[in-house]
Image: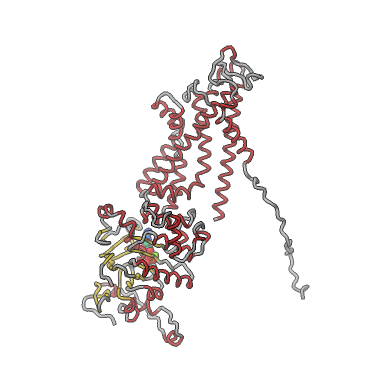
Amino acid sequence: MSSQFEIVGIRPADAKPPVRRQKWYRGKPLFAAALLGLIVAGCLGCGYIMTKDPSYMNLSNCNVAPDREFLFGTDTMGRDIFSMIWYGGRISLFIGAAATVVSTFLAIVFGALSGTAPEWLDTLLMRLTDILLSVPNLLVTVLLQAILGEANVLSLSLVIGVTSWTSIAKVVRTEVRQIRGSEYVIAAKCMGGGFFYILRKHLTPNFISSIMFMVVMNVRSAIVAESTLSFMGIGLPLEVISWGSMLSLSEKALMTNSWWMILIPGAFIVATLLCITSIGNYIRKKANNTQSNL
Amino acid sequence: MNDDILLDVRHLTHVFPLSKKIAVKALDDLSFQIRRGEIFGLVGESGSGKSTAARCIMNLYRPAAGEIIYKGVNICDPAQFRTHRKMLQTTRQLIFQDSSSSLDQRMKVCDIVAEPLKIHRIRPARGSLRAEAEFQLRYVGLDAGFLDKYPSELSGGQRQRVAIARALSMEPELLVADEPIASLDVSIQAQIVNLFRHLQQEHGFSFLFIAHDLAMVEFLCDRVGVMYHGRLVEAAPAKELFSSPVHPYTQALLSAIPIPDPRLERARQIRQFTEDPENFQGVLTEVSPEHYVLMREGEHHG
Ligand SMILES: Nc1ncnc2c1ncn2[C@@H]1O[C@H](COP(=O)(O)OP(=O)(O)O)[C@@H](O)[C@H]1O
Ligand SMILES: [Mg+2]
């Protein structure tokens, strides 16, 4: 009997599928996280690892190449770059974080407002963001900074934050338009929840995963913006030490052939950005996965 | 029975604009009243405007015409709504058809049940919000083990119980339930309807129960209104409506209910209902005490 009904082309499945134990760190950007953690910890605890006063200008020690005393050398004003890196990193990272907080807050409020607004207001607000989005960021930044006057850390964070919320706001608005008709939002409205209550309790938790990647990337672009602006001489002044303002010395450094003045802050910036990018990519992948699992 | 009227819907009309030229008249001169402590059933085929009526009553839609008087307040008037907002939000509660979408998937059951208390910053009578949530859950037949679960871990019936607990945590005076049992299994439907009946006796709230399952309506409701294309065609006490329907649409609707007796069931005839516009003209006329039928002046339905 069995020979008559032989099944062709089907192999019996292995009785035991090979169980491969998933390591907890598989696919997680461990190296990036560790490196970023190290940099952040070093910057936050710069008081413990600095060997010199970072703002002390020792003119007898200008342009010293890295040696035993000055681990990363000194700059054209005789400041110790090793100390400056950690000390200035604090400012750069702070600007990255503060600008992101500002832009994310603006984006969420603006996006949610637009997403819950009636049709005409929504259109108006979105056209407005389109206009902002189409103007080069740098232009707006320079303009705002010019209005605000002499840049300091807070004003620079504010300016960078105010110029970088539009793309997140568009995503928030699209998400909110989908969520706002859900019955749990209507139920919360019936119960008397106000705009900010619903935004905090129901909207944000449900769209946060889709903007998380952009938020992390915003930290990155804020650090880049700070460096760029300071490099161009319209950001932080030379006395305020940050990675960007350290790079602004590079012009002079090139003339004296002091590679360390460019390479070392540059390397720190690039390493930080790469770490943030890889963490951001991980978050994006995870968000996509959880969405498809629903 | 207390004859005090809690909710008075008068000549309610609501229009959905589909485009600049076309509009759907979802409610057309709808009038009914709900007394304190009464269960009023609203039935009608899908698309007859039941949900729209519920949402107008909950102030989610602004009706195009007509008024809704709730506890003496015209809630369609923005100024009056604003002055009584707090009272309106705390004493009216809505339960949706689909409990999987009316509960936020990212909130735990205890947060969901205590949410209205939190919004209105009401000091929970039983100490903490969690204790309050547990109390309300027990009321609807769920034990404390459900407090820390997420809605996706519950069955449909359990989720609907959570939604009921959330609505009841405010001790509402008017509960509006929009097809609360339509997405449940038949056996669970009966449980939930029993629960509603029990809770209504316990709390004494007025209850607008929207359904298209007529058997459940007959069991639960004191009075029933039948809707067709946005109009109320007949309203009567439940017993009377089911024993002697007058309007042809109601008769057709009732003749479609299966009878749990084979002999009678075999003899049952489903009455054909022709969409004769003649049947939907005129005014609600009282044919016997409390029994209103939509008909022309002096006309009598067979
Ligand atoms: N948001 C809306 N936009 C346009 N038309 C709608 C909307 N909601 C309901 N309608 C229309 O209004 C009518 C009544 O709908 P509804 O109140 O949902 O009926 P029911 O709840 O009795 O099934 C239907 O014809 C429906 O197509
Ligand atoms: Mg409906």
At which x and y percent is residue B244? Answer: 32, 81
Residue A7 visible at all: yes
Split into 4 quadrants, where in the image is the C terminus of chain B?
Answer: bottom left
Residue at left offset 46%, top offset 49%: A175
Residue at left offset 63%, top offset 40%: A30
Q: Of residues B55 and A80, which is closer to you in this image?
A: A80
Q: Is residue A155 left or right of residue A247?
A: left
At which x and y percent is residue A176? Answer: 43, 49
Residue at left offset 28%, top offset 55%: B84
Q: Of residues A141 and A100, which is closer to you in this image?
A: A100
Q: Quadrant of ligand 2?
A: bottom left
Q: Which quadrant holds residue B282? A: bottom left
Q: Residue furthest bottom?
A: B263
Q: Of residues B171 and B43, which is closer to you in this image?
A: B171
Q: Of residues B3 and A114, which is closer to you in this image?
A: B3
Q: Vertical placement of A95 versus B113: above or below?
A: above
Residue at left offset 44%, top offset 65%: B140
Q: Vertical placement of B102 versus A109: above or below?
A: below
Q: Residue furthest top?
A: A60
